[in-house]
Amino acid sequence: MTANTKRALLGCIADDFTGATDLANMLVRGGMRTVQTIGVPESNETLEADALVVALKSRTIPAADAIAQSLAALDWLRAQGCRQFFFKYCSTFDSTDAGNIGQVTDALLDALAADGHASAFTIACPAFPENGRTIFRGHLFVGDVLLNESGMENHPLTPMRDANLVRVLQRQTQSKVGLVRYDAVAKGVSSVRAAFDALRGDGVRMAIADAVSDADLHALGEACADLTLITGGSGVALGLPANFRRAGLLAEQGDAAQLPRVEGLSAVLAGSASKATNAQVAAWRANRPAFRIDPLAAARGEAVVEQALAFAQTHLERAEPVLIYATATPDEVKAVQRELGVNEAGHLVEATLASIARGLRERGVRKFVVAGGETSGAVVQALDVRTLRIGAQIDPGVPATATTGAEPLALALKSGNFGTTDFFDKALRHLDGVAP
């Protein structure tokens, strides 16, 4: 069999934008040339890549809408010739009892079965040990603490108050949910496949998979070679490129992460309220220019966007990168939500930062670092980004990216919980071409 150089091998659906780049980063590290689309493309023109990642903004929308968008993405990926499919969600399993992980997985399995694929079984594995997400006996740990003690219990949209993912997923689906226990994973690929067979025989359609190390993820990835659909965080994708190589479908290549150099000014936009982003904002503010968005002022109709852009202009004229942020403590977030409502507060912050992003581009900003999945989605839509080439990793789960087209933008889209405390500076150096 000769190596595939045109048609995509792996088709991925991500429920938010930073999650999409997180997954794409993992695939690029495995030597797969990867293109990320923003939403489902309107054209079926073949994109030349080894892996395609469709970035949706479906994590917190009604389940019926998430299903419809995910099925549309699946249809487009099938038209691109993809052989295997991946549904990517957050490594902290962000969801509620109303969805959307279980419902979307059910819909994708049903659609693939109707398309002639025999397998009606998949795994659910959000583990990402490199970023401190591990699963043991079905329980998700963030660092050394259970998920529900990690700060995620205070998430404004998807508070995670149960670390037992078997229970969490079972509340979202009528399908039977099981567990691939660590005992099986630790014994390697053959043992994992035997566990899959046993679970299928017991009527299980989805199985949480334990994993505490990258070696576990490689074993799970290899064991999933024959599954039509895989679901999880980006970590489980570690083992997928090697499957295609073993099948003679993927060539060895050293330039999968190559991106064009982008010239222009730089800015950071932060909307996440996570612990990591709060620390990153604090580190930046210690010695760099920053402007805080007040959602209540925006709700009162004050000229917050204009004020932020005027602040930015002063520094951009001196080629100084700026941070514009709405990041706040959990107590501050709750206070705003009490006054505006949970959904309205989130939408207001996203819309405000999206308008600021458009204004920054008009003022010559071509390099954007964006913190927060929902914020990233709003910003890339505001900037009319359609496709991204995925480059080298900045921090685990966060690659550099560049848009395609005549006037490219350089983007680093960061999940709220990802990145070291100095991530903003590090990312800007990387987008400037200073970092390796």
Image: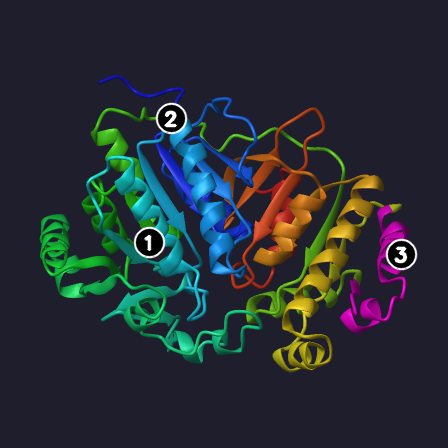
Residue 275 figure quarter: bottom right
**319 in relation to 417, above or below:** above
Measured from the top left, where is residue 189 in percent x and y?
A: 14, 49
Please tell me which residue is depicted at 60% across the width and 65% down the height of the picture.
277
Please tell me which residue is depicted at 68% across the width and 81% down the height of the picture.
338
Q: In this view, does 131 lie to the left or right of 432?
A: left
Please tell me which residue is depicted at 30% across the width and 57% down the height of the picture.
124
Q: In this view, does 256 lie to the left or right of 286?
A: left
Q: Residues within 10 Å of mark 2 (few under 14, many from 20)?
A: few
Stretch in magenta: 291-316
Measured from the top left, where is residue 334 in percent x and y?
A: 65, 80
Do we see residue 135 in this rendering? yes
Q: Which of marks 2 and 3 is in front?
A: 3
Nearer-N-terminus badge (3/1): 1
Q: CA gap, disc 3 to disc 1? A: 45 Å
* Amino acid at pointer 3: Glu
Depth order, front residue of 101/403 = 101
- Residue behind mark 3: 306
Q: Is residue 307 magenta?
A: yes
Q: Residues within 10 Å of mark 1 (few under 14, many from 20)?
A: many
Overall secondary structure of the magenta section: helix
Q: CA gap, disc 2 to disc 3? A: 47 Å
- Residue behind mark 1: 106
* Amino acid at pointer 2: Gln
- Locate the C terminus and report the quarter of the image it occupies: top right
Q: How crowded is mark 3: few (under 14 residues within 10 Å), some or many (20 or more)?
A: few
Please tell me which residue is depicted at 43% across the width and 43% down the height of the picture.
71
- Residue behind mark 2: 253
Q: Does the magenta stretch include residue 225?
A: no
Residue 253 figure quarter: top left
* Amino acid at pointer 1: Asp
